[in-house]
Amino acid sequence: MARPRTIPDEQVLDALLEALMDNGPDGLTFTRAAAACGLSPATLVQRYGAREALVQAILLRAWDRLDAETEAADEEEAPTPEGAIDLLLRLMPIETAERDATNGLLLLREDMRNPILRSRGAAWGHRLADALGRRLSKDQAQSKRLGWQMASLWQGAHTWWAFTREEPPERAIRRALEEWIAGLK
């Protein structure tokens, strides 16, 4: 008979996401993972099997969290262009902007290489573009196009902020999005 789990998978995976962000996917060993979550390396091997499966489980949990955050932001932010900006900035916590722009790229690389994770990312992108587009246009075709453009601009603004760092991230990214929306009029 299997022993009951004293620490639920969600709690383990949330703790391991932090370790993954700190060490990168290639630097996450079962020993480091065990230190981060409080379980033994043997227990982690028993739960997840290979290290690659552990990394995939962590990133799938991260996608679950991002899906939930996106859904909540979509429900709570105003159905206006300004609401679209607020939605995006809500998904990019300022306190982790630098880490997300550097170490986060290592996770994104894993998401793109793994077909299961890539599929999750694509599905999230469609939901995000839809949420943004509904705030930008009532025309369905234009809404889809503008939603994808805004999502792309958001990611690009975050990346360019990481290079230049001429102002705080929230201000730089908000300004880029506001200027883009002003150009639509």
Image: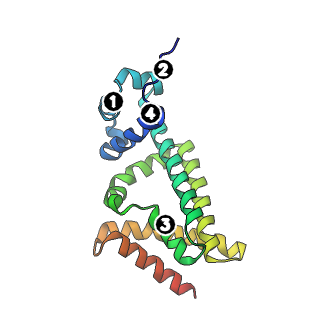
Measure the alpha-carbon separation of dots 1 and 2: 15 Å
What residue sits right under mark 4 in the picture? 54
Identify the mark nearer the N-term, 1 or 2: 2
- Residue 131 percent location from the top left of the image: 61, 65
What residue sits right under mark 3 in the picture? 88
Pointers 3 and 4 in contact (C-beta within 8 Å):
no
Q: Left or right of 140: which side holds 20?
A: left
In the rendered structure, find residue 38 and report the number of the disc placed on it: 1
Query: Which one is closest to the eye, mark 3 or mark 2?
Result: 2
The quarter of the picture where residue 116 lies is top right
Identify the mark nearer the N-term, 1 or 4: 1
Amino acid at pointer 4: Leu
Q: Residues within 10 Å of mark 4 (few under 14, many from 20)?
A: many
Identify the mark nearer the N-term, 1 or 3: 1
The quarter of the picture where residue 26 lies is top left
The residue depicted at 57 percent of the width and 48 percent of the height is 120
Amino acid at pointer 1: Gly
Identify the mark nearer the N-term, 3 or 4: 4
| SS for dot 2 | loop
Measure the alpha-carbon separation of dots 3 and 4: 29 Å
Identify the mark nearer the N-term, 3 or 2: 2
In the rendered structure, find residue 8 and report the number of the disc placed on it: none
What residue sits right under mark 2 in the picture? 4
Measure the alpha-carbon separation of dots 2 and 4: 20 Å
The residue depicted at 50 percent of the width and 52 percent of the height is 66
| SS for dot 1 | loop
> 97 or 73: nearer the eye?
73
Pointers 1 and 3 in contact (C-beta within 8 Å):
no
- Residue 133 percent location from the top left of the image: 62, 71
